[in-house]
Amino acid sequence: MREPSPVAIAIGRRFRAWPVRVALAFLAGLVLMAVYAPFLCGEVALFWHDANGWQLPVFGDLFNAWSYPKPHDLFFNIIALELPFLLVIGHLLRKRFRLGRQLVAAAGIIVLSTLICVLPWLPSANGWQAPWRKKIQPVQTFAQAAAQPDTVWAIFPVVPHRFDAHVPASSLLPPLSVDAASGRRFWLGTDSAGKDVFAQIIFGARISLTVGLVATGLSMLIGTIIGAISGYFGGWVDLALQRVVELMMTFPTFILILVVVAMLGRDIFIIMSVIGITGWAGTARLVRGEFLAQSVREYVLAAEALGLSRTRIMFRHILPNALTPLLISATFGIAGAIGAESGLAFIGLGDVTVPSWGVLMEQGRQNIQYAWLIYAPGIAIFCIVIALNVVGNALREALDPRSSG
């Protein structure tokens, strides 16, 4: 068995602190809740038994674009199906492949599976169709089971209705209320449209994680490229690029996001793209500093003497040695992106077609007397931001040799 590296030892020492463990446990639970949201809330049965025998309707519904119209939902649904197999395979191959390679391979498998589900390759009467498409609405639902209690036996999720289901005459009900027509309980009440708040909190975890990862990944990509070019080439290239970076840092980012979202629309993918495109300046400055320090090292001079291309030197040799501060910055960046999206939604510029926590808080702002619309999503946002900052601070203390302690 390989000996743990000094980095792994340092991270393990910092992560033994109980606040970090609590933060990691919360984040792990949040990720699992987001991945398995369809199994926690939804109208489609998990298990269904009638005259035709046993069925698992929820698995077929995962690829129904009527039920899950957004691409990020398909991505999470595929993770839900493949995660147990990936964990078992990773455990069996743990001695042959490092964790980093396993994560890269797992991500590749999930992305490939998503593309396969989106591309049309299944023949049908209507031509070639993709597995993920709009299909006939499922019939194995809570309402169908209630209509035939003598012939159907079914198990439903904890919240037996969808996050976007408008329950008639059930708007702004307090927590623990019961729908008189169906007998369904609203654990955290309902919003002004009669939609279950608990279901929106569960599926809202998908939105927060998607916004945080996509926006931070985009800003990291742009900032890394600009910072690497600026720090490695120096001279007039560095001078010109740093003026652009300073311009981006001087301009109020949130105001720029407001303007772009107001012009292009409130679609959640536009929002996360704008947050990523406008948030790369800090990453560029960070990467530039690392490249300035690394570009004069002996291994860089040796690579240049061997005639390697500048692109290979920058991204194959220097960049891996500059990833430590980027990893720490990404953790704080995810928290910032989630806060930015929630702030936009809170002031009325969020995407109302998705179960965003910020959209729920915006409804609470309009209906201030209904406190559960503010406290439920507000506590969720507070917890995820605090947890990410605790983990980011632990990484900084473990990986930054200049930190105290």
Image (cartoon, grey):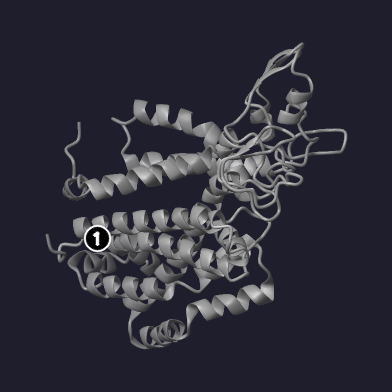
The residue under the point 77% across, 11% down is: 51
Between residue 367 and residue 60, name the one nearer to us: 367
Question: With 277 as the anchor, is 12 left or right in this view?
Answer: left
Quarter of the picture containing the C terminus is bottom left
Residue 71: x %, y % from top left? 64, 49
The residue under the point 65% across, 30% down is: 58
Residue 390: x %, y % from top left? 30, 56
Question: With 145 as the anchor, is 125 left or right in this view?
Answer: right
Determine whether the residue tagged by mark 1 lies in a helix, strand or loop. helix
The residue under the point 47% across, 85% down is: 251
Residue 160: x %, y % from top left? 64, 34
Q: Which residue is mark 1?
A: 396
Residue 97: x %, y % from top left? 33, 35
Assess disc 1: are there few (<14), some (14-19) or many (≥20) residues with their C-alpha within 10 Å of its C-alpha: many
State the image quarter where residue 46 is shown. top right
Between residue 398 and residue 337, name the one nearer to us: 337
Q: Is residue 162 above or below residue 85?
A: below
User: How many numbered marks are there?
Assistant: 1
Between residue 326 and residue 148, name the one nearer to us: 148
The residue under the point 17% across, 47% down is: 13
- Dot 1 amino acid type: Arg
